[in-house]
Image (cartoon, coloured by chain):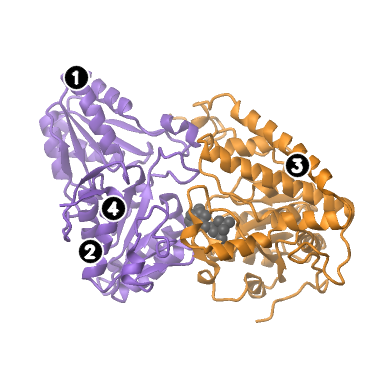
């Protein structure tokens, strides 16, 4: 099956699995490279911290994103201020990169009613829990932006499992028919909980499905943050130019369990996991930055300490939040703060 | 008789059905290789093979819709929906097809399938993993709704549901999966869909509950017994068809009723129970029927769930107030 390519032509890949610049690839902008790395590192450190907080019983079930920062940060940092992000539960890394406060995310997984809410000016929709159900929202928001003559695009993140849901089909179809400036980024991490990608679709690639909707689809190495960034930037530009939506399949791997309640050793081999660790996105950028002379070991340690301090502050703030207010249970059910008959 | 947890009894019931009837197929997300996210189907794929215990694509409408086609063609699908909050994409298939296939074809086509789904709160779960949506399905003629509270009933009702000629929504109280144990016969047996069970006899007030609210009601009954109030606890076991005769019989004896459920108040199944009691035992009532339910709001983040889901103390307070009426 033919995968429809961008009308912009072939898109570049940048890094090999060891973080070396691929032959023929143009070196990414150094400032962008450093910003992407810092945001990926922050996401990774927060993620590790959340897993620990769950193990200590301080937060509830948590879905780790480790290994998927290349997709999430590459995509989120290609967005413009006015664009809206539609994340799933695992997409805290992308949400943070769009300005979602870290303590609000920790509070969300703590089960605190004030958690997970984006402040004014941060265009991050709430984490979608029913798999795939936010895909039509992204189509609708982007369609609305076109109707209002505004420049804002939608960027929607979801997993490979989500592409089996009817909402994936309906959302992509609407977006294409309405020429909505939406970018759909599937994080193909190989599994939906325990179910391998091969049981979600008999198609070779998710990107191939784009053809059926009449939109371009492409597969990128999701662990090459520069490649993701370039692909999403091109797709967003396409949307802004009035050419409609794009489907991007980013190949990646979830290094950790599905959630802190999951035991991946029941469905993945240690060899497979070790192979995936060798290809993971964060170490790749670190290797690249070091080889390019942009960030040596000492500076990297310094940066790690810096982001750890940010994570510490966020966790402290979330844990010190005032107790959940029972009034919040009903306060926001409808606009008038409750039902007439309550 | 081996002692079983509620989830162990469900697994055992599925194994009995798979072993006895080659038409039975267990299907759903993660039910095969890992045996379900709660391990309800653990070991079944190894024992019965990947064509009978099937990991499906992640698509609830697809699961319910294909189950209807499979059932119509002669299989007995037992589909798992991972949490009750995720049954919703399948609702069109259940409402528009499973529930009315028999009626619209005068029995020429039928959908004898079971949809198993863990439901209920108080397990510190993320959003939409704590829903109690029985009222949606009880509003649906053509579908039966069962909800056990004990291991023995879980196995017996599940086997009855699988044998039933019509679609059954089988709600499994997650909170009780591993917290209750009792001896359960190892062989296949059924607990018929319909009859309620008196979980505790009493003369002063009838407390009607199902699923995870049954232990809460029993704790409340034990508590008010200290004040000399003898509460009768009725475990409905099956919501539709509803055992109106047992309800009427109990309320005629006690003259008072309290209905308890985890779902929200307005349009909850408690309203139906209260209406049936009013219809069948109005002249025996010495107090209005009381409802102890969740408030009319979305299920809250889990730090507030204790304030949302009825607790034994809430049930005890309602019992005392109807007795004092
Ligand atoms: C509609 C729906 N069905 C089932 C679930 C339970 N569930 C949560 S995550 C998940 C797997 C999702 O896999 P995928 O879309 O590949 O994303 P990933 O978790 O790998 O990031 C399942 C089945 C859910 N949240 N929503």
- Chain of the residue displaying label 1: B
Q: From the viewer's perspective, is A200 left or right of A156?
A: left
Name the foreground residue: A88 vs A166.
A88
Residue at image point 35% right, 42% down: B175
Crowd around label 2: few <14 · some 14–19 · many ≥20 (10 Å): some
Quadrant that contains the C terminus of chain B: top left
Distance CA(mark 1)–CA(mark 3): 61 Å
Q: Where is residue A136 in the image (x, y as percent from the top left)?
A: 61, 57
Q: Which chain is orange?
A: A
Q: Which chain is purple?
A: B
Tell us which disc is closer to us: 3 or 4.
3
Name the foreground residue: B244 vs A199.
A199
Name the foreground residue: A276 vs A83.
A276
Point out the tag, 4 or 1, that comes first from the N-terminus.
4
- Chain of the residue displaying label 4: B
Secondary structure, mark 2, is helix
Name the foreground residue: B77 vs B72.
B77
Please give the label number shown on residue B81. Answer: none
For this orientation, the residue located farthest to the front is A298
Query: Relative to A15, does residue A109 appear above or below in the rendering?
Result: above
Is the shortest distance between ligand 1 and the CB of mark 3 under 8 Å? no
Can residue A132 be seen here? Answer: no
Task: Check if mark 1's residue and mark 3's residue have beta carbons within 8 Å.
Answer: no
Q: Position of residue B114 (x, y in %)?
A: 31, 61
- According to the image, label 4 marks what residue? B8
- According to the image, label 2 marks what residue? B16
Please give the label number shown on residue B226. Answer: 1
Please give the label number shown on residue A304. Answer: 3
Secondary structure, mark 4, is helix
Residue at image point 54% right, 62% down: A270
Distance CA(mark 2)–CA(mark 1): 43 Å
Query: Relative to B4, does residue A220 appear above or below in the rendering?
Result: below
């Amino acid at each position: 099956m033919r995968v429809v390519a961008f009308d912009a032509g072939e898109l570049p890949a940048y890094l090999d699995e060891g973080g070396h610049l691929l032959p023929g690839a143009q070196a990414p902008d150094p400032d962008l490279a450093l910003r992407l790395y810092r945001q990926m590192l922050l996401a990774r450190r927060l993620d590790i911290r959340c897993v620990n907080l769950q193990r200590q019983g301080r937060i509830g079930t948590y879905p780790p994103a480790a290994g998927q920062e290349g997709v999430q940060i590459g995509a989120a940092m290609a967005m413009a201020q006015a664009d809206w992000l539609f994340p799933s539960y695992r997409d805290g890394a992308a949400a943070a990169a769009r300005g979602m406060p870290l303590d609000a995310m920790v509070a969300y997984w703590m089960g605190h009613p004030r958690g997970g809410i984006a402040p004014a000016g941060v265009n991050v929709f709430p984490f979608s829990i029913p798999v795939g159900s936010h895909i039509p929202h992204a189509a609708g928001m982007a369609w609305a932006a076109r109707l209002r003559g505004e420049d804002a695009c939608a960027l929607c993140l979801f997993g490979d499992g989500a592409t089996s849901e009817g909402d994936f089909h309906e959302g992509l179809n609407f977006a294409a028919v309405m020429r909505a400036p939406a970018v759909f980024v599937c994080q193909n991490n190989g599994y939906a909980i325990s179910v391998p990608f091969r049981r979600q679709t008999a198609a070779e690639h998710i990107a191939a499905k784009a053809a059926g909707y009449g939109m371009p689809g492409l597969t990128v190495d999701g662990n090459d943050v520069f490649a993701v960034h370039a692909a999403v930037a091109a797709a967003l530009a396409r949307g802004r130019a009035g050419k409609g939506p794009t489907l991007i399949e980013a190949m990646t791997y979830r290094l950790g369990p599905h959630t802190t309640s999951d035991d991946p050793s029941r469905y993945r081999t240690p060899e497979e996991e070790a192979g995936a660790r060798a290809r993971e996105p964060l170490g790749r950028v670190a290797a690249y930055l070091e080889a390019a002379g942009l960030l040596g070991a000492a500076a990297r340690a310094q940066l790690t300490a810096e982001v750890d301090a940010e994570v510490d502050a966020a966790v402290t703030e979330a844990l010190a939040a005032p107790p959940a207010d029972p009034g919040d249970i009903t306060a926001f059910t409808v606009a008038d703060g409750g039902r007439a008959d309550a | 008789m081996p002692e079983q947890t509620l989830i162990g009894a469900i697994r055992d019931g599925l194994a009995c059905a798979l072993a006895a009837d080659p038409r039975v197929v267990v299907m759903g997300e993660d039910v095969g290789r890992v045996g379900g996210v709660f391990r309800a189907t653990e070991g079944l794929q190894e024992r019965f093979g990947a064509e009978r215990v099937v990991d499906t694509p992640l698509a609830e409408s697809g699961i319910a819709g294909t189950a209807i086609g499979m059932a119509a063609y002669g299989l007995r699908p037992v589909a798992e929906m991972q949490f009750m909050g995720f049954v919703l994409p399948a609702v069109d298939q259940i409402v528009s097809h499973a529930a009315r296939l028999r009626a619209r074809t005068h029995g020429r086509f039928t959908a004898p399938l079971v949809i198993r789904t863990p439901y209920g709160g108080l397990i510190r779960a993320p959003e939409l993993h704590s829903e109690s949506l029985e009222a949606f399905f009880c509003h649906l003629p053509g579908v039966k709704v069962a909800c056990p509270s004990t291991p023995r009933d879980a196995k017996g009702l599940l086997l009855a549901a699988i044998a039933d000629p019509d679609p059954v929504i089988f709600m499994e109280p997650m909170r009780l999966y591993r917290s209750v144990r009792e001896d359960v016969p190892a062989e296949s047996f059924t607990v018929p869909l319909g009859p309620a069970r008196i979980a505790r006899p009493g003369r002063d007030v009838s407390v009607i509950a199902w699923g995870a609210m049954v232990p809460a009601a029993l704790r409340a009954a034990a508590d008010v017994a200290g004040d000399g109030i003898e509460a009768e606890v009725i475990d409905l076991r099956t919501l539709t068809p509803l055992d109106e005769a047992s309800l009427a019989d109990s309320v005629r004896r006690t003259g008072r009723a309290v209905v308890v459920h985890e779902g929200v108040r307005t349009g909850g199944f408690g309203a139906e129970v209260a209406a049936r009691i009013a219809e069948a035992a109005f002249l025996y009532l010495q107090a209005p029927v009381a409802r102890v339910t969740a408030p009319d709001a979305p299920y809250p983040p889990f730090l507030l769930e204790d304030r949302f889901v009825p607790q034994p103390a809430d049930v005890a307070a309602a019992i005392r107030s109807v007795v004092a009426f």
